[in-house]
Image (tube, rainbow, N blue to C red):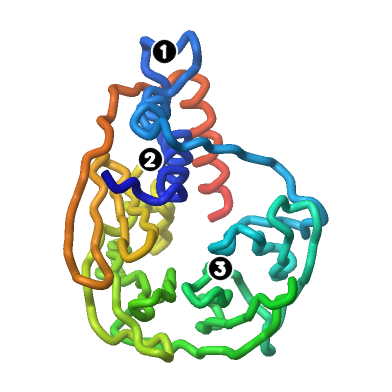
Amino acid sequence: MRVPTLKLIVLLILLSQIQSCENKKTSKTNEDPFVEGIKDSFPELTIESRDYIESSEKEPFKVTVTSDSTHLVVADRASYVIQLFNQTGTEELSKVGGEGRGPAEFNTISQIHIGHNEALYVLDILLKRITKFHIKNNELRYVTTFNLESAQNLSLRNVFVTKHGNFGVYLRIDNYENRKESFHLYKLDTEFRPDRHLLEMSGNEKLKLGKAIYVNKLLGQKTFWDLQGSWFYYVNSYTPLIKKYNLSTAERGEKKYFSLADRTNSEQRKKVLKDRMSAAIKRY
């Protein structure tokens, strides 16, 4: 059995912690049966977490690892800085970026991705561009910038640089009145422009907060995806069915690795959800 990427499993675990609550049978131990089910289905995976990185910037929020696991790359959403750390996160080796519109500067850091060529690609959806860096001799070095062209009402959300070519996940607004959306996987050309449509995925369910104001619904349907080798995996939060698409052969498949147990909201978690939604409504 081919096990999907660890990051996808971690996403599912995080999703379960936000979206659901413990089963009545396990309420005494405060364990979520969904999380326990994932652990039982993948006993070979060990997840270790740390809540800090030495010498990090103001608000680190995205982390990726080089394929040989020798470096950590950390993006900071407050300072718009990209940092290169050793594999334990205890020593900063290099730093690039900052807020701005010049080369190697950002208005937002939407994604950081290590390509199959070990180059680092940083997606900025506000500036509509991808910045490429090399990681060499423990240093991040600026290479070039790819400016993204608007095409077919699409907004790039993820880019993947593989040995089979470049690929991208786009958000498409299908209805501007209710903000209904969908996600689409495309094959990209060498300049990261859409070349060929490969598949469509469900969009995130929206909650209306006011006139023409919509946000992702906290307990609504969401779609997650990730890449491992030649396989692109995607999953809907309402089902444990994991679907996959092979970037090389166009082969498709799906697998149900676990079942969703009956889960109910405790009073404590209902309060947490209510507080979160109240804060979101006040902001708008």
The reply to whether dot 1 and dot 3 touch (C-beta < 8 Å) is: no
Which residue is at a point 45% across and 87% down the rendered structure image? Answer: 148
Q: Is residue 50 left or right of residue 30?
A: right
Query: Is 123 above or below relative to 48?
Result: below
Instruction: Kindly report the distance in space between the C-alpha atoms of the residues bearing marks 1 and 2.
Output: 21 Å
The residue tagged 2 is 219
The residue tagged 1 is 26
Q: Earlier in the sequence, mark 1 or mark 2?
A: 1
Q: How many marks?
A: 3
Judged by depth in the image, the label closer to the viewer, 3 or 2, is: 3
Looking at the picture, how far across and down is residue 273, in whole percent? 49, 34
The residue tagged 3 is 112
Label 2 crowd bin: few (<14), some (14–19), many (20+), radius 10 Å: some
Looking at the picture, how far across and down is residue 21, in whole percent? 42, 25
Instruction: Kindly report the distance in space between the C-alpha atoms of the residues bearing marks 1 and 3.
Output: 38 Å
Looking at the picture, how far across and down is residue 4, in whole percent? 35, 49
